[in-house]
Amino acid sequence: MQTIAAYGASAATAPLAALTIERREPGQGDIEIDILYCGVCHSDLHTVRNEWGGAKYPVVPGHEIIGRVSRMGGAVSRYKVGDMVGVGVMVDSCRTCPSCREGLEAYCDEGFTGTYNDADKFSGGVTYGGYSKRIVVDQHFVLAIPENLDPAAAAPLLCAGITTWSPLRHWGAGPGKKVGVVGLGGLGHMGVKFARAMGAHVVMFTTSPSKAADAEKLGAQDVVVSTDKTQMGAHRRSFDLIIDTVSGQHDLNDYVRLLTRDGVLVMLGIPEHAPPPLSVGQLIGARRSIAGSTIGGIPETAEMLAFCGEHGIVSDVEVIAANEINTAYERMLKGDVRYRFVIDMATL
């Protein structure tokens, strides 16, 4: 085992602070990564504060990891020392169930192993994430990062990026399709960028008129203030696909009625409270669907990263020092970030 500097929380009510953790030495199929940058996801905050329950302290968050290969086991052939690589939300899965065999490890029948706060089958303890100087991961869950991308801005692609790419790809966003993105945050801004680069006509839905200019800069051809019934009504029965990134309570019926026949509303956010009752008649009357989606599998994530390299797509980020993370959490709660914080791990 090796001792690694990290940043984490010792309790739900404790601020994040510097600490040390232990990681395994690289096994035959492992890659050791010197972490350069780690994105800050809203789920990091939820886990640290035990808002979803099940937090195992100390919690070292972080699943948007970018770094360079420093060591690797003898069975690793895909990478070499010095390669720029990334690690996302998963570091393992059963690899034998139908989903895993199809490269959809995020839907593993046994449940994938999360990059942090999950059972570590190697140590018998808990997995620790990317708020640390180094990580050791099985080669299957390590991803190549195009060298032409800014590594700090590429970090959120490993979660916010793939979470929006996957439904857009699965439900066929592209030329001739009208795609809506609900919510202009860490997920939403990536959804706009991807849908536009795929060739779709992109409409941004927001409750804040002040975000219209930003949405257009990101690639939205139209911006709709979702609280304006006239603006919403003008788009009735016209969308092939809407991806909803909002976790706050809102009425899904407002978006279902905007779908064309066979249109799909895909939920990415998890509202904290039950939404208003759904009008099933609106689904039946136009063969519409409501679906859910999470991160993609490893092959799909690799495809996304290659697409980003080809099109020069990265997240809009604000780089912070490790000791600024507690302030960043408070700002994140207020929506005061455009659109993702990323920790410079050289500051740890």
Image (cartoon, rainbow, N blue to C red):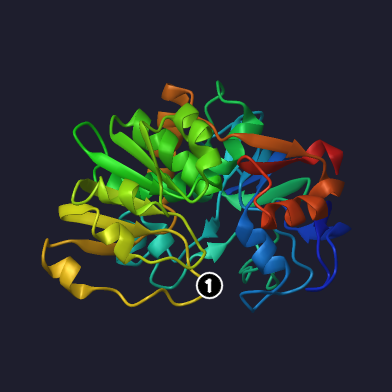
Can residue 273 be seen from the camera position used here?
yes
Identify the residue at image location x=61%, y=61%: 43
Q: Quick one: 42 or 61, which is closer to the camera?
A: 42
Rendered position, 37 above or below 326: above
Can residue 76 be seen from the camera position used here?
no
Q: Quick one: 60 or 298, which is closer to the camera?
A: 60
Instruction: Give the side of residue 302 with respect to residue 45, left or right.
Output: left
Q: Quick one: 191 or 3, which is closer to the camera?
A: 191
Identify the residue at image location x=54%, y=65%: 113
Residue 58 placed where, x, y %?
79, 69
Identify the residue at image location x=59%, y=34%: 316
- The residue where tag 1 is placed is 272
Instruction: Give the side of residue 285 with respect to residue 82, left or right.
Output: left
Identify the image quadrant of the C terminus. Answer: top right
Rendered position, 13 above or below 255: below
Question: Would you identify the image quadrant in which residue 32 lies?
Answer: top right
Residue 234 placed where, x, y %?
25, 45
Number of marks drawn: 1
Identify the image quadrant of the N terminus. Answer: bottom right
Instruction: Give the side of residue 23 with respect to residue 335, left or right.
Output: right
